[in-house]
Every structure is written in C-alpha cells, then in structure tokens.
C-alpha cells in the first residue's frame, strides 16, 4: 500500500504541475491535450511487454526499478522549470512525460502481482477494498499537494517533491518481505506469452465481462470531464465549485471502500456489480438534468459510491480468477481496458456535447451506461450469478 500511494502521489503531483507548466509556456489549451497523448501512446505500446516481464522477472526488484525510473521524469522537469535545461522547449517536456507513460505500464502489474503473493485468497475482497481507499485517497491528495506546492514554492519544488515520493516508493518495495514465485524452467517467447494472457482473459466470461463493463461505464458515463462547462453554463457557480465537483466522486468511492473493507462482498457479488453500474448511469442522468449545484454534487457523490463498488468487485474478480504465473499479463490487459477509458470517455463526452449540447450529451451517456449493464447481464450469465466464495474456492 505504501508503494501504491507513493507512486500515485508522485504521478498526480507531476500531472498537476506539468499542466500548469505547459499552459504557462504556451497559453494554448490544445497543448494540454498533447500532455495526455504523450503519456497514453507510450503506455499502450509498453503495457503488453510490461505484463510479460512482471511474470518472468523478480517482481519486487522490477517494482523498485520502475519506481526509481518514475523519479526521473520530475527530475528532468525540475531541470527544465529551473532553467538548467533549455534545449528542446516544450518538446523536452513531452519527452519526459512519455517516459512516465512507459514506466506507469509496470506499476499496476507489479502491484497486482505482489498483492496476490502477500494476502491469502480469503482476504482478497478486503484487500481490494483497502486498495481502493488508498487509490482514491492518492487521486484526491496528489493533485492537492502538487497545486499547493506550485502556488507556495514554485514548479521546481513541486517536481522535486514528486521525485522524493517516487524514491520512497522504490524503498518501500525493496523493504517488502514477500516470497517470489520460482522462475519457470523454460521461458515462453515474448509474443506467445502475451498471446497466452490475452487468450486467458478473452476466454474467461466473468473476467472479460467485468473488465468490459467497467471500461464502457467509464467511457460513456464520464460526465465529470464536462464539469467546468456545467459550472459556468448550467450551475452558475464560482471556480471553487469545480474543486467540489471533482472531489465528490472520489469521496464517495472512499466511503464505499471503507464500508466494503468492513463488510466484504460475497453472495450475489455479480448482481451487485451490475446494479452498481446501473446506479452509476442513473447518477449521470441525474447530474445532467440537475440545475442546482449541491444536487449535482450529491449525484456525483453517489456516482462515486457506485463506482467504488465496481472498482472493488472488478479488482477482486481479477485477483481471484487469475493464476499467479499470469498476474502481470492479465493486469496489463486490465490496464489497456481501463487505462484508456477515461481519456476516450473525455473525448466522447466533449464530442457529444458539441453535437447535442451539454445536458443531452450527459443524459445520453448515462442511458448508454444503463444499457451496457443490461446487455452484460444478458450476455454474461456467469457474472450475473457470481458469488465470490466460489472464486475463492477456485470454482
């Protein structure tokens, strides 16, 4: 958990600071979009190979190495912000962010692979709930710390603190006492190994349905990307309202994570997951139709509660359904499913808002999310009838 939250704090702190840095240099919103593109493209290229390496190399050392490499990006950006490195202009910033995209492809698979070695199977549901709390807490506090440091001490200090977080994550990984799996006697060729992981995911109805359900729900129901427009055009609230709307889903997810840590899902877990996605879609419809700020914030808070159920259920299914020797590859495929959905969802929401208007775009996205849950319940009966104790027992 220390490794996870420290890497998130580093990554989120850099994301906030570099956005401010790029806009300060260019005054062009389109250049902010290129920051995301500079990270996502390397991530997609590296992720399949990262999963293979996590499954064949010592995971603890690989995680420490990845965290150490994560510190390189803020150090490079600190040198640029301080004026020590002047070559390349904004291209040098994008190149540093591309390195983060490559490194981030290793962080999730390492965490998920070691998660399965640290905890007994019966504790996976509680562990996934605690992991969700840590993840959401990092998403809230990381940008806050980064923004505060930029305003208080400047960009170089914010970058330096992000590098310290990454270095501490590497130390946390090196200090972890965990039994590593024995290396395979013969190694499968890289492409065959990646294909084996893909066949496992696409041949497992419950796992594939859970990943696809989460991806499409976030993709079509991602109204939060339109929050700045809603604040100004619909809700007529000040800029402080944007921070409240942004924090509301994470707060709901943290609350649900705490609840599920104390009362883990078991019976009817698949049905609860499907109902949570339906609830998420209904919250998006309510948010789109609301014209009162605090009612909109409540809908986003409830959407975070529903999303918290979805995240914990999906993480638990992935951990329980995946053999230990495949955890890296399956986690990488999970990253390809989920890691792209926020960016694609933001693009979809913006495009539909331009075509249909703000309110129709969000309402339509919520309706599509409800429809996705209904189709999944119909096409994946094993997920609909899932009880977690069956996966714990290996059935």
Image (cartoon, rainbow, N blue to C red):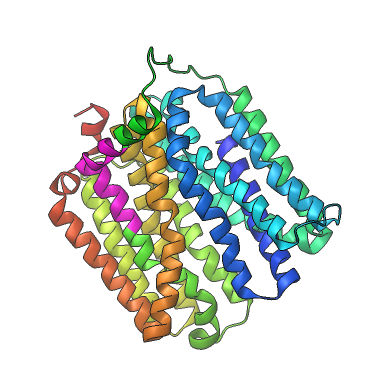
Whether residue 282 can be seen here:
yes
> How far across and how far down the image is residue 323, in percent?
31, 27
Whether residue 13 can be seen here:
no
| In this picture, residue 291 sits left or right of residue 245 | left
| In this picture, residue 82 sits left or right of residue 178 | right
Count how many numbered circles sit on residues in the image.
0
Which quadrant of the structure image shows residue 71? top right
Q: Residue at x 42, y 31 (%)?
A: 52
> How far across and how far down the image is residue 50, in percent?
48, 36
Magenta region: 198-215
Which quadrant of the structure image shows residue 388? top left
The single residue placed furthest to the top in the displayed view is: 185
Q: Is residue 193 above or below residue 70?
A: above
> How far across and how far down the image is residue 80, in percent?
79, 55
Q: Nearer the viewer, residue 185 or 393?
A: 185
The N terminus appears in which quarter of the rendering?
A: top right
Q: Residue at x 27, y 52 (%)?
A: 273
The C terminus appears in which quarter of the rendering?
A: top left
| In this picture, residue 57 sits left or right of residue 367 | right
Q: Is residue 158 above or below residue 321?
A: below
In reply to whether residue 43 is colored magenta, the answer given is no
| In this picture, residue 270 sits left or right of residue 166 | left
Q: Nearer the viewer, residue 189 or 372?
A: 189
Main SS of the magenta segment? helix
Q: Residue at x 58, y 73 (%)?
A: 242
Q: Residue at x 73, y 41 (%)?
A: 164
Q: Is residue 21 above or below residue 122?
A: below
> How far across and how far down the image is residue 65, in percent?
62, 31
């Amino acid at each position: 958990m220390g490794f996870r939250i420290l890497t998130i704090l580093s990554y989120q702190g850099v994301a906030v600071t570099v956005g401010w840095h790029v806009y300060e240099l260019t005054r062009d919103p389109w250049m902010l979009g290129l920051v995301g593109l500079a990270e996502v493209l390397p991530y997609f290229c590296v992720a399949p190979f990262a999963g293979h390496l996590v499954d064949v190399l010592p995971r603890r050392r690989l995680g420490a190495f990845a965290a150490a490499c994560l510190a390189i990006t803020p150090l490079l950006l600190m040198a640029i912000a301080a004026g020590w490195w002047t070559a390349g202009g904004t291209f040098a910033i994008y190149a540093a962010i591309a390195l983060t995209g490559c490194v981030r492809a290793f962080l999730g698979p390492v965490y998920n692979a070691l998660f399965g070695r640290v905890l007994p199977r019966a504790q996976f549901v509680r562990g996934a709930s605690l992991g969700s709390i840590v993840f959401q807490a990092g998403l809230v506090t990381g940008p806050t710390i980064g923004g505060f440091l930029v305003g208080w001490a400047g960009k170089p200090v914010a970058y330096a603190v992000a590098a310290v977080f990454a270095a501490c994550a590497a130390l946390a990984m090196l200090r972890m006492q965990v039994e590593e799996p024995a290396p395979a006697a013969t190694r499968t060729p890289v492409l065959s190994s990646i294909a084996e992981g893909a066949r496992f995911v696409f041949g497992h109805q419950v796992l594939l349905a859970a990943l696809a359900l989460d991806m499409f729900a976030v993709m079509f129901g991602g109204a939060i990307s339109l929050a700045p427009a809603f604040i100004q055009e619909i809700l007529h609230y000040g800029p402080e309202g944007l921070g409240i709307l942004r924090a509301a889903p994470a707060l709901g997810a943290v609350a649900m994570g705490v609840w599920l840590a104390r009362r883990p899902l078991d019976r009817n877990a698949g049905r609860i997951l499907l109902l949570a996605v339906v609830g998420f879609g209904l919250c998006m419809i309510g948010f789109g139709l609301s014209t009162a700020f605090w009612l909109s914030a409540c809908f986003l808070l409830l959407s975070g509660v529903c999303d918290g159920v979805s995240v914990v259920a999906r993480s638990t299914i992935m951990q329980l359904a995946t053999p230990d020797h495949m955890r890296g590859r399956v986690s990488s495929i999970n990253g390809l499913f989920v890691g792209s959905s926020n960016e694609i969802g933001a693009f979809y929401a913006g495009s539909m808002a331009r075509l249909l208007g703000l309110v129709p775009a969000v309402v339509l996205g919520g309706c599509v999310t409800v429809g996705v849950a209904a189709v999944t319940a119909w096409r994946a009966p094993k997920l609909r009838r899932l009880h977690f104790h069956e996966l714990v027992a290996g059935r």
